[in-house]
């Protein structure tokens, strides 16, 4: 197996919590096609106490904004992600914890589909494979990643 076999040991835990339902899933991950992509090249001043909305930097996809960052974490916001948007499965070098603030999207985790919608939250440990298969309703989310200013 590839580097993603570390996910077999860790397992990916997806916690989806909304007003209408609550699920807990554990999945193993495979593959490693896009491991070297840096979605958040270092930008701005680490440890800036306030980042105004107008100061947030455009992220890798052009649909996300990188906000505050510290030595061990960084915040990004996904806004107005259009219907039909998708990206291929890849792993990422940092943990990602997010909260869906609007819309609906179908994600794949270890080849299985999950629907993420407003009010749901998620956790993706570093090294696990994930993809957005399709945005079904204009999507928005806020994420915190553990990469920080040093990555």
Image (tube, grey):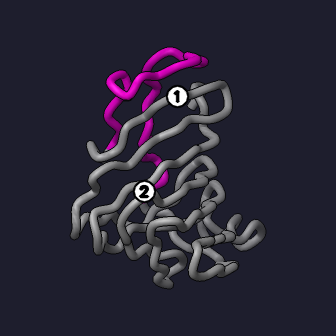
- Give the residue displayed 22% in from the left and 60% down from the top: 82
Q: Is residue 92 above or below residue 58?
A: below
Q: Position of residue 18 (x, y in %)?
A: 58, 72
The question of residue 78 being in magenta is answered with: no
Secondary-structure class at tag 1: strand
Q: Is residue 61 above or below residue 107?
A: above
Q: Position of residue 24 (x, y in %)?
A: 69, 79
The part of the chain drawn in magenta is 34-60
Q: Is residue 23 above or below residue 85?
A: below
Q: Main structural element of the magenta stretch: helix, strand or loop?
A: loop
| Quarter occupied by residue 101 | bottom left
- Give the residue displayed 65% in from the left and 77% down from the top: 28
In this image, 74 relative to 57: left or right? right
Q: Which residue is mark 1?
A: 68
Q: CA distance from mark 1 to mark 2?
A: 25 Å
Mark nearest the camera among 1 and 2 is: 1
Q: Position of residue 49 (x, y in %)?
A: 58, 17
Looking at the rendered image, the quarter that the N terminus falls into is bottom right
- Give the residue displayed 56% in from the left and 32% down from the top: 151
Q: Between 125 and 79, which is closer to the camera in this rendering? A: 79
Q: Between 134 and 104, which is closer to the camera in this rendering? A: 104
- Give the residue displayed 68% in from the left and 70% down from the top: 13
Q: Which residue is mark 2?
A: 34
Q: Earlier in the sequence, mark 1 or mark 2?
A: 2
Dots 1, 2 in contact, CB < 8 A:
no
Of all residues, the one furthest to the front in this rendering is 19
């Amino acid at each position: 197996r590839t580097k993603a076999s570390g996910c077999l040991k860790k397992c990916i835990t997806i916690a989806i919590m909304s007003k209408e339902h609550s699920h807990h899933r554990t999945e193993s991950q495979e593959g490693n096609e896009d491991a070297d992509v840096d979605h958040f090249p270092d930008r701005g001043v680490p440890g800036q106490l306030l980042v105004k909305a107008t100061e947030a930097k455009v992220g890798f996809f052009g649909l996300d904004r990188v906000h505050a960052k510290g030595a061990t974490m960084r915040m990004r916001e996904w806004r107005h992600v259009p219907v039909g948007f998708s990206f291929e499965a890849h792993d990422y070098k940092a943990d990602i914890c997010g909260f869906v603030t609007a819309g609906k999207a179908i994600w794949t985790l270890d080849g299985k589909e999950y629907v993420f919608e407003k009010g749901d939250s998620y956790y993706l440990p570093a090294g696990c494979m994930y993809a957005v298969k399709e945005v079904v309703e204009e999507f928005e989310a806020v994420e915190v990643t553990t990469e920080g200013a040093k990555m």
